Image: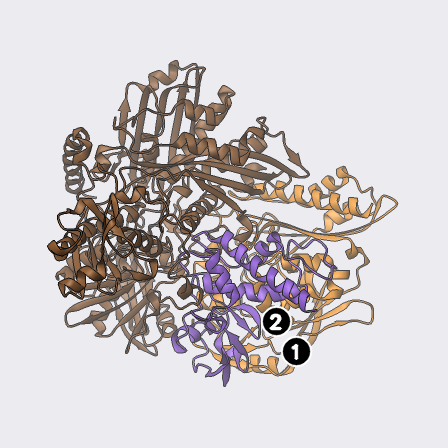
Chain colours: A brown, B purple, C orange
Amino acid sequence: MSLAEDAKQLVQGAMQGLMGKAVALAPDSWIPGGKPDPLIRHQHGHIGKPVTRIDGPLKVAGAAPFAAEFPLEGMVYAAVVHSVVARGRIAELDVTAAEAAAGVVAVMTWRNAPRLKAPPVFLSDPKAASGDNLPVMQDDEIHWNGQPIALVLAETQEQADHAKSLVRATYHAAPAVTDIEAAKAEGTKPGVFMGQPLHNKIGDAEEALAAAPVAVDATYTTPGHNHNAIELHAVTAYWRDGTLRLHDATQAVSHTAWTMAKMFGIDEKQVVVTSPFVGGGFGGKTLWQHQVLAACASQLTGRPVRLALSRESVYRMVGGRAPTEQRVALGADRDGRLKALIHRGVTPKTATNVMPEPFILPTRSAYASETMLLDVQVVELDMLANTFMRAPGESVGTFALESALDELAHALSMDPIELRLRNEPEKDPTLGLPFSSRHIDEAWRAGSERFGWSRRNRTPGATREGEWLIGVGCATATYPYYRMPGGAARLTLTRDGRASVDIAAHEMGMGTATAQTQVTAERLGLPLEAVTFNYGDSTLPGLVLAGGSQQTASIGASVIAAHRALVKELLKLAGNDSVLAGLDADEVGGHDGGLCKLDDPERCESYASILNRAGRDSVVVEAEPPMPLETQHWSMHSHGAMFCEVRVNTVTGEVRISRFLGSFDCGRILNAKTAASQFRGGIIMGLGLALMEETQFDPRKGRIMNPSLAEYHLPVHMDVPQIDVMWTDIPDPHAPMGAHGVGEIGITGTGAAVANAIFNATGKRIRDLPITLDKLL
Amino acid sequence: MNLTVNGVVAALPDDPRVSLLDLLREQLRLPGAKKGCNQGACGACTVLLDGERILSCLTLAVQCEGRSVTTIEGVGAPGALHPLQQAFLEHDGFQCGYCTPGQICSALAMADEIRRGVPSHVTGDLTAETIALDRDELRERMSGNLCRCGAHNGIVEAILETFADQTEQLEAAE
Amino acid sequence: MNPFVYNRAADAADAVRRAAALNAKYLGGGTNLVDLMRETIERPPALVDVTGLSREIAQTPDGGLMIGAATRNTALAEHPLVRERYPLLTRAIVAGASPQIRNMATVGGNLLQRTRCVYFYDDDGARCNKRRPGEGCDAIGGFNRMHAVLGASDACIAVHPSDMCVALAALEAVVHLEGPAGARSLPLTDFHRLPGDRPDLETELAPGELITAVELPPAAVAARSAYRKVRDRASYAFALVSVAAALELEGGLVKDVRLAFGGLAHKPWRAWKAEAALRGNAASADAFAAAADAELADARPRSGNAFKVELARRTLVAVLTDLAGAVA
């Protein structure tokens, strides 16, 4: 990122900081969520029910159309040629053999690609979606090992793939920075995330650490990770009447449309992105070069283009989580009260993005400590831009922080749960804001009871069954409540008592469509079957990223706003002849197919009756929610207490997870079935992070060496035990529906819970992920 | 030069490079079998070839001459789901749904393998006549089907329930 | 994938004839070859499909088994006589790959699997003496946690990925071949080569030669046998170390023993030295450890795989200890 861009970010951050102070001091009632969502009081309706996924029948029948499954007349297939050097210029790019190969329609390179502006990088604008800000195939410059240098287009995929192997490239390689250690030796620079420095300082933590009666101080390292959604990134692109249409697999339909429009210099309405089903995202299904290349290729050939990336191409073109090196030092008095909390370290990024892996985020609100020093330093490498991956920051940050807490508990001979509870903060330790909802103590209490924590053997290495040592460990999980600006929703109510919600949101398996159908049905007082939730299309209202676990809140707030507009409209239509006459929007709610006075359920009129009398077939409203000021007025977070039992083989060092429990405090749960799956899914990805996942980046060439599901290990069925999950179900009074998104918290704390259990089993403290068996021999 | 797909005769491709998976997805417009790696590492492309589970991404279509392929589209459709598909719904044995067709096809053949007595890595006694369909056997035998959303527990429960029932029905019938 | 001509062979002689005429590679289950062709590491102008050849598993007059090369891995693993007489072979097969792959993969193809070295797989991005002899080996000094500690060279440190072959090495299997020059056979332990300065040559197969069968001689010792595989996840991963072992005791002494390692070398590694150290001696923990040390004394680990030596030692000792306990 340029200095100018950094400066812009910092100015934005400072503005936010000033605004934040005003918002923090404002009365609750001025703030969104200041008045609790009335749905929080609905105890026996649709909300929370374990409703089976409404899109489930399509998915189990293989009938849900994914992005690579839109066949178009005259479509050509594409294959990507990648650079094999990390920096420099293309010397020769010979595509003649490829062009001459059977079935080849065109070979696109920087020489013949349509001219484009560089993409706005994610976070540089509310609608920006690109993983980096590099021009796409516009010149001969190479920025990373794996950069696309040519796109082969042919009548069949087989022909494109073969022709790809006929492209000959040579390079004028330039010196590249691809080694973190070498880059560190040249100096680091402060990390900036979402406009704010990744730095917090309270008192003199180093001094307090040195003076603390008990202290631990260690370095933890985590490797790069890749999202590895099983669906390969794919897009089908075509132009019609000046409009670019993309069938994409994306977590950001509207962001993608806007960003593509910027690049092509057209209006954002001239880009239509649909993405009805996404085969897993986890932060990886945003805008990368493949959508741009497909759109360019379609322009070049005048034909629809299908670009379905190979697994290797996904690794070469779609960024992953950056590695981290984190020092955590804790100083405490003999009662375990923290005197010093230091969490600092280094992570690599590229000069082309604004995403330092923000591993201190969980620490900012975790524990009360007299002094604190949190800091992220950055080195910039010549590599594919790193990006957001499930719980960026928290996933790897909690590994270090929560391992250190366990080390401190051991040093104090104290129950690690007691140590955590003893350091529960009264208010947010770094922001000074009150917590909107924090019941972590209840999560710990309920979890430890269910897990049987009190029956554990506290002595490391003391429980054995044959070849296997058995141990248990725990850790805190945490993830913020976010709501990003830009939501909007359209509600349509028809005379036959049906309603539909239109919003440019996403379904990647979270159960969004199902849970939001429940919420909308409850809000309107309709049966589930009467509500349709339309999403996954950039022409729908709203700018709703499926990221940061914020989609639930964003949709919730948008539907609240639309619902309020709908109620106002209905009251107007009901007029003076209605039993509702004289009531205002705050006094009525949806109930049993109509509107009723909230405190007098007998005073009702059905939607059908209102619309009939008004002579209307339907009412359509669209509204936007207020800015998400609640996140600057309260400290809003989800929490969890993670418990793990491991078995470690004394002969081979193999680790098996035998039990896992996640006890969560995430506000109100909207759908018990899909939420449980989200929690489990996060935990399982956390087990992968703990035990096996690693993107092997060879610093000699700056090249990822295991771009494959055979060599990058994800947990398989045999690695996954039955995972128990439970939740407090205590609503956050300041969040829509009282709910928090639950997609990311499961991966947080899991790595540390596993590592802490391994310590309890073996007496060995592994601070370097993944915990492969060689580290335990 | 034909093969049969879900009971319907289809022509083999002219280009021998076409995998069975691409024949299904691109030429026969049966996208139920999924492409997750195209290298035999994820199991999303699992289909049944003459009743046995195989990876369609590593199978050349021309090798299937005269053979019978069953894809998820031949297992059950919305409105007429197979009991295993229904159990996947009940137990939430999927999230994004992308690995799901492969998991279901794989599980159907796995149940046959267990009935046939094919041993697995976790089978205790190699000479035993019957193999119990327990969670360990099932997890080991399903390990060739990756799931990134983490629906493993639901998948295992769905399979257990479906085939435990079938076992009971078989016993009752005898 | 390069364009190629597809042929199906009616029998072995037909296959050999066709392959010679077309300069073809033989295609079995395709689980490795199709992948390598897609990666353009293999670029044969023609394929001769040999999956229609013999998949018979027949008893030989001397009480062994003759296994047709087109036999699927699953069929071999589930065969009653294999389970009864050569349990380590069943164990090795079901420790490998996934059920889908085992349903596809043939016995002949399994022998010809190529390494999973990530630098070998990176056709355009890395140097590899297997792919282009003489250009160098990027695995040395790179990610070589999975790589060889025995029998490697400075040209190549790749390992053979098969589990089945490790059991076959311990069982003294014989590989039957047919080629343009006629039929011949050779012991499995001589079938695969060590890399030396020609890591591109992985087996003793002559051009155009076809594996027609694998023969298992009778092996009383195999009645008590085991295959233990250690890997980075609980299933569906290649071995870091594996041990195939069979042990026959008499009066507390080792009467016969067969040992082979997987994951340590460019070929399934028959542990002759460890066997020699044990044969005729007491079956004790010390003896097992000494035998392991005898075999592993020549180990030459690289930057990332020193742990394999200790892991192999421990695994071998544990397997032998288990077998001795089971025998006693």
Indicate the position of residue A456 as horizontal and vertical percent values. 58, 30
Disc 1 is attached to a residue of which chain? C
Mark 1: few/some/many CA within 10 Å (<14, 14-19, 20+): few
Q: Secondary structure at mark 2?
A: loop
Amino acid beneath label 2: Ala
Q: Nearer the viewer, residue A328 or A725?
A: A725
Q: How many marks?
A: 2
The amino acid marked with disc number 1 is Ala
Place of residue A465 in the rendered image (x, y in percent of width and height, measured from the top left):
67, 37
Q: Position of residue B107 (x, y in %)?
A: 55, 63
Kindly identify which residue carries mark 1.
C181
Picture quarter with the C terminus of chain A:
top right
Nearest the eye: C64 or A406: A406
Up-down: is A299 above or below B41? below
The tag earlier along the polypeptide, 2 or 1, is: 1
Residue for point 40% across, 48% down: A675
View extreme (right): residue: C251
Classify residue A250 as left or right of residue A411.
left
Against A221, residue A670 (above or below) is below
A56, A763: nearer the viewer? A56
Residue C175 image point, x, y percent: 69, 68
Q: Identify the element where label 1 is drawn.
A: loop
Residue at the limit of the structure toward the bottom, as seen here: B1
Q: Are marks 2 and 1 on the same chain?
A: yes
Which quadrant holds the N terminus of chain A? top left
Q: Label 2 is found on which chain of the structure?
A: C
Q: Are marks 2 and 1 in contact (CB under 8 Å)?
A: yes
- Label 2 and label 1: CA atoms lie apart by 9 Å
Q: Is residue A493 visible?
A: no
- Location of mark 2 (residue): C206
In the visual, does A693 lie left or right of A623?
right
